[in-house]
Image (cartoon, coloured by chain):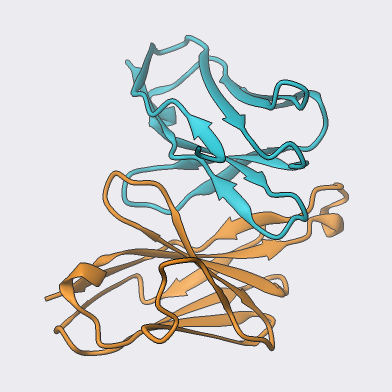
Amino acid sequence: GAVVSQHPSWVICKSGTSVKIECRSLDFQATTMFWYRQFPKQSLMLMATSNEGSKATYEQGVEKDKFLINHASLTLSTLTVTSAHPEDSSFYICSAEGWQGAKGTSSYNEQFFGPGTRLTVL
Amino acid sequence: QKEVEQNSGPLSVPEGAIASLNCTYSDRGSQSFFWYRQYSGKSPELIMSIYSNGDKEDGRFTAQLNKASQYVSLLIRDSQPSDSATYLCAGLNTGGFKTIFGAGTRLFVKA
């Protein structure tokens, strides 16, 4: 199946520093990638939609100047948490939208998730 | 009103039983629906997708879609303890630009 990787898998940083998280689609091209945040025992919260070659679309309440998203290629999107604070500690998950036509199915718009990045800000 | 609603559970079933997970959605224009499984501390994993009314079977999993009732369900036959996880229902919104996730149903399968 479609594979999406994230790096790093976990990171601990001091308050005020910036952290960059990479999301890569390994065996398919993803024109659209999504960034989610998940707090313990809560559901996924979509932060932004990232389209290759254009500015990301942020969900209401998500600060675009704090969460910088770059989608420079069809296989890579990055999320940078700038000036991180303890309340930014969370599980950050990316997903890539893939087409399944190559598998001989008619499915489309399925999202394939990366393994997630656990961010802890001290 | 939440766009995709699920009973948060927990739903507890004995090993070998059928687990039935339900989901309703409010966007009548939604055409594509997905079930994801998420183990604690892990990211979601796609287990089923369904686009047409009726049933779709894949191994022990059967997804059911009723667009008239705006209802999606997932049946897990012969439930195993390894099926214990949170199951997320998701639908693609009208226009297909955004996937809307439900809050998830926690399933416990007792050995």
Name the residue furthest left. A122
In the shown orientation, is residue A2 left or right of residue A44?
A: right
Please tell me the colour of chain A. Answer: orange
Q: Position of residue A114 (x, y in %)?
A: 50, 63
- Count numbered badges in the picture: 0
Residue at 63%, 35% (x, y): give it. B26
| Between B106 and B79, the one nearer to me in the picture | B106
- Can you see residue B59? no
Q: Position of residue B56 (x, y in %)?
A: 76, 26
Residue A81 position by quadrant: bottom left
| Between B24 and B33, the one nearer to me in the picture | B24
Rendered view: B73 above or below A110: above
| Between B98 and A22, the one nearer to me in the picture | B98
- Can you see residue B17? yes
Image quadrant in which the C terminus of chain B is located: top left
Residue at 77%, 23% (x, y): give it. B68
In the shown orientation, is residue B10 left or right of residue A94?
A: left
Residue B81 position by quadrant: top left
Q: Position of residue A8 (x, y in %)?
A: 36, 76
In the shown orientation, is residue A17 left or right of residue A25?
A: left
Residue at 78%, 53% (x, y): give it. A108
In the shown orientation, is residue B2 left or right of residue A8?
A: right
| Between A74 and A70, the one nearer to me in the picture | A70
Residue B84 position by quadrant: top left
Rendered view: B72 above or below A43: above
Q: Position of residue B66 (x, y in %)?
A: 74, 23
Please tell me the colour of chain B. Answer: cyan
Residue at 68%, 40% (x, y): give it. B27
